[in-house]
Amino acid sequence: MQVSLRVRRFDPESNQGPYYQTYSMDAPDYYTVLDALIHIREETDGTLGLRCSCRSAICGSCAMRIDGHAKLACKTKIIDLTADGGEVTVEPVGNMPVVKDLIADMKPFWDKIRAVDPWLQPEGPEPEREYVVPNEAMQDLAGAMNCIMCGACVSDCTVLEAELNRGVPVEKTWLAPAALAKAYRFVGDPRDDHQYDRLEKLSDSGGIWDCTHCFECIEVCPKGVAPMDRIMALRDKAVSAGITNNNGTRHAKAFHDSIKAYGRLDEVTLVPKSVGFFNIRELLPQMPTGLRMLKAGKLRLPHKAENKKKIKQIVDSLDKEQME
Amino acid sequence: MLEHDVLVVGAGLAGLRVAIEAQKQGVDVAVITKVHPVRSHSNAAQGGINAALEQEGSPDSWEAHAFDTVKGSDYLGDQDAIEIICREAGPEIIELEHMGVVFNRDETGHLGVRAFGGATYSRTFFVGDITGQALLHVMYEQVLKANTRIYEEWFVTSLIVEDGVCRGVVAMDLATRRLHTIKAKAVVLATGGAGRVFEPSTNALIVTGDGISQAYRAGAPLMDMEMVQFHPTTLKQNGALLTEGARGEGAYLLNAEGERFLGNERNQFYAPSKMELAARDVISRAEQIEIDAGRGVDGCVLLDCRHLGEDLIRERLWQIWELAMDFANVDIMKDPVPIRPGVHYIMGGIKTDVDGRAWDVNGGGWGGVKGLFAVGECACINAHGANRLGANSLLETVVYGRRAGLTAGFYVKEAPTALLSEAKMADDESRIKEIISRPDNGDRWAALRLEMGEMMNSQVGIFRTKENLEGALEKIQEMKLRYRHVPIQNKGNIFNTDLQFHLELGLMLDCAEVIALSALSREESRGAHYRLDFPARDDEKWLKHTMAYYTPEGPEMDTLPVTITQWEPTERKY
């Protein structure tokens, strides 16, 4: 099939800014985006920069944005993207600085991984033989170990994007999905003896409570790791462990209580309830946003939902299920 | 000038294991790697890692594992090296488990095993079908914990050998193209195999034989390079590997007639008793015979997993389910998937002793380069002989990685500090400048690489003859001449992959030449090396290793005896 690849080019050695270059080719039906890029690099344009190695979605080198979303180029067939004569847009991963063409500087990604102390920390004398643990626990962790560290989830994380857009320095941004999925792998490991410390650290600002449930990381993960689900599991574990003295837990509780009381969300008290009513230091910076929302008609004083009773029943039954 | 006690080249499982062990000796260790460590090709190992772990009521023993390995090697493996790898396997598995590897368990919560090819008992420990990835990522965690210095995305252009001693490397920082001399008292090569010398291949694009060629050029001999393993189950579309674990779990191999052909008596090469769990060389040959005889499907035979059930596939073979789905459009739960033999692994490599030293300390008469170590697929410690058993390669990386790390750690404590010139770096700089400045003559390294790979597959493949091998050598000579004039388009400094791949091709051509010449010299059939003109194993003449030494005129061949401890060669049947 005839296809055009519109590739974002950038070479810091030239004086040019980033630009798009279109390569057209006759691509066999089995061609992946990576096949096409390799074809370009080998046959037509040796200056095109990209990382790739295994060609079978194992090494994690070739994550990039394809038609706007992070994907592994080696796992994405052109025929699934466009019809004969169509165009595919290829860009480097987002949320990380571009070094050249499709090559990004992954340092922010690795720094976040490192920040969760990503190694097993058992205490006490090692057993002579293996640790005896249930297979189900290992199976669950193997699902998280399926992560190939490609960075797709970090590329498309909307929380991270918003932080970077706000000008938050990258080292101050939140841990983001991949590192938290990695953290889950240790918190969920019955052999690890630092689960509580880990959860406590992860419950701090910039950790598990910063996720906004946008599902993007689940959507783009090429290995089914479902980072957001792991983050939610970490929240459960943290709350169960009694680590609740933090904005995240208070926020979740305020959410819950408001729904139970009014059948809908009371946005006015949500923020103060999350950070604490007398926490001027954290409340003050939120004021302008609150005022803008009020002006735009997005904030309403608490008012009850029509079928409040029914909603309360649902909440109660969920609470009961949780207790059990 | 950058300087370390031990410099490990390559950050796959073997390299990282070396680094961890050497660092424990209190010496200064660094790792240099052309890709980020977790991008390394150890990832691709799927099925598992072998060990005869002592367990109550288990009839298995390290001796049984060793015998299977000796037999798998078609008696070419050095039995001292095999005894070590099998004896030390158990503690390595336990150590990996303690590091955090999430091995599958049995119903009692103890380590579980699966069956694998060429093994008398089930002794393959595994993490689904992502064992290599699970091990590599855990080893990387350990390196993070130890805070090891890693030169990421640096490409070694030469080893520096002065007065017959390896004293460091010249390396290019790929992000800037700048060359650096890195001085080291010991250099440990852990650069992986040379699979891309063949096309197609299961191997990642980075597997270009760098360390093998560089050691060879630096004066270290290469051993048994003719021994190239074809894996029996690779996808037709992109050569991707489908684990032997599938057959370990009970999958069948079928021909076009739906027959489990390995059990057919019509051919002496088949494996009526072990069937799908025979050694890889045996099965790959059988498949090729079926395909050549017209009993294949579109140049393939079929791997049938349907009867294993969805639950088992979901728990233990999820990756190959995905691979077959993504690349062959086949749901292995519902249909058999077409597969064929594909180049997978090189048993041969840089000759080392059982501690990873690539020089002769015991008066064996094979020379080598002092201060140089090798481990993993690039090395030939010779635990695999003429055919490696599945799930012995991961084992080799950790057993011999630890031994080489330990030995290198000791070695550098005694090694004197030497002055080092930057002459080699200047040489490499002018060599690279010359390539960059070449006028465009219309030729491309990619075209030459493809030609080399396809030629190697057709002429130095599963079935070999004198005529084909001589033809291959002639073509390689032509290619080497042509290579000297191949230009590159990219003249830039930042991640100039055009330049990197050009340099890699030069290294691969050396590997190709040694593989073809070693294959020509071995006038018998043994393990993975099958000569149509010498179809029998010939223990009288060829119970020995081929050795290739670099000379400016081309490889010089020699032989070394095989070490036999307790298993005398007998007929090999599966």
Image (tube, coloured by chain):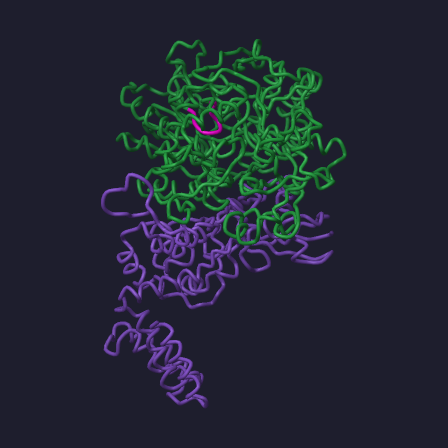
- Image coordinates of residue B448 in percent, x first then y, are 66, 30
Q: Residue at x 56, y 14 (%)?
A: B555
Q: Residue furthest front?
A: B57
In front: B294, or B204? B294
In front: B57, or A287? B57
Total labels drawn: 0
Q: Is residue B516 magenta?
A: no
Q: Residue at x 53, y 50 (%)?
A: B312
- Image coordinates of residue B328 in percent, x first then y, are 65, 47
Q: What stretch of residues is rendered in magenta?
A: B374-380
Q: Residue at x 55, y 51 (%)?
A: A72
Q: Residue at x 25, y 69 (%)?
A: A245
What is the letter of the green chain?
B
Q: Is residue B378 magenta?
A: yes
A133 sits left or right of B347 in the view: left
- Image coordinates of residue B47 in percent, x first then y, are 50, 40
In front: B361, or B250? B250
The answer to whether one can see residue B131 in this image is yes
What is the letter of the purple chain?
A
Q: Quadrant of the N terminus of chain B?
A: top left
